[in-house]
Amino acid sequence: MKHSGILIVVSGFSGAGKGTLMKQLVHAYDNYALSVSMTTRKPRPGEQEGREYFFVTREEFEEKIEQNGLVEYAQYCDNYYGTPREYVEKQLEKGKDVILEIEIQGALKVKKAFPTALLLFVMPPSAGELKKRLEGRGTESREVIQKRLRRASEEADGIENYDYIVINDKLDECVEQMHSLIQAAHYSPVRNEELIENMRKELEALK
């Protein structure tokens, strides 16, 4: 049975390892398309335009908002982040499962716009491990790390809005678990209304 693609929204605390997890998932399985977000923040060392993000000015981003060219957008740590609409819709039509790595405000907006979207929240094994990972990056000041930890504390209030929690402890196990959850989601009744309706019609015809 062929399925159309589903939209997967992955959120999690900054430092929980979402980016690494997504790259590994896309590398291990061939039916995923990783949506590239647009942001007004400056690139970190090693990041490339169009790979990690589309880096734009505040003016360019606001123009995109006016054109309804974003699935969702939000402000986080004084910068805009958003998901370009055109790419997402094209990939879903091709039957690809599109992964959006976005924060909690954006995730809830996507769920409103795409009720069949699957929401996954990535958590570290503990808060102590989260702090260790943030410090281990070596790319941010102590003040920024504290800001991210405060933000994580606020975000913890919204986790119950997600469909599943994924604990990112051992990367390979986490990737496999995430893939299994997504595959199972393809068979939920809410994502198979056409199939159910066809079955009803066929049964009706056999009466």
Image: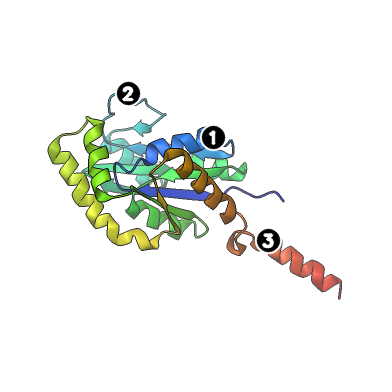
Residue at x-position 51% and y-position 49%: 7
Residue at x-position 52% and y-position 43%: 176
Residue 11 sits above or below residue 202 on the image: above
Q: Which residue is mark 1?
A: 28
Tell me if 171 is positioned left or right of 26 in this view. Answer: left
The disc at residue 46 is: 2
The CA distance from mark 3 to mark 2 is 45 Å
Residue 111 sits above or below residue 70 on the image: below
SS under mark 2 = loop
Colour scheme of the rendered structure: rainbow
The CA distance from mark 1 to mark 3 is 30 Å
Tell me if 127 is positioned left or right of 102 in this view. Answer: left
Residue 179 sits above or below residue 139 on the image: below
Residue at x-position 49% and y-position 49%: 8
Residue 191 percent coordinates (x, y):
60, 59
SS under mark 3 = helix
Q: Which numbered disc, 3 or 2, marks the residue closer to the eye?
A: 2
Viewer-side residue, 45 vs 176: 176
Residue type beneath disc 1? Ala
Tell me if 142 is positioned left or right of 202 in this view. Answer: left
Contact (Cβ within 8 Å) of mark 3 with mark 2: no
The disc at residue 89 is: none
Residue type beneath disc 2? Gly
SS under mark 1 = helix
Q: Which numbered disc, 2 or 1, marks the residue closer to the eye?
A: 1
Specify the farthest residue to the bottom.
207
The CA distance from mark 2 to mark 1 is 23 Å
In the rendered image, which quarter contains the C terminus? bottom right
Q: Which residue is mark 3?
A: 194
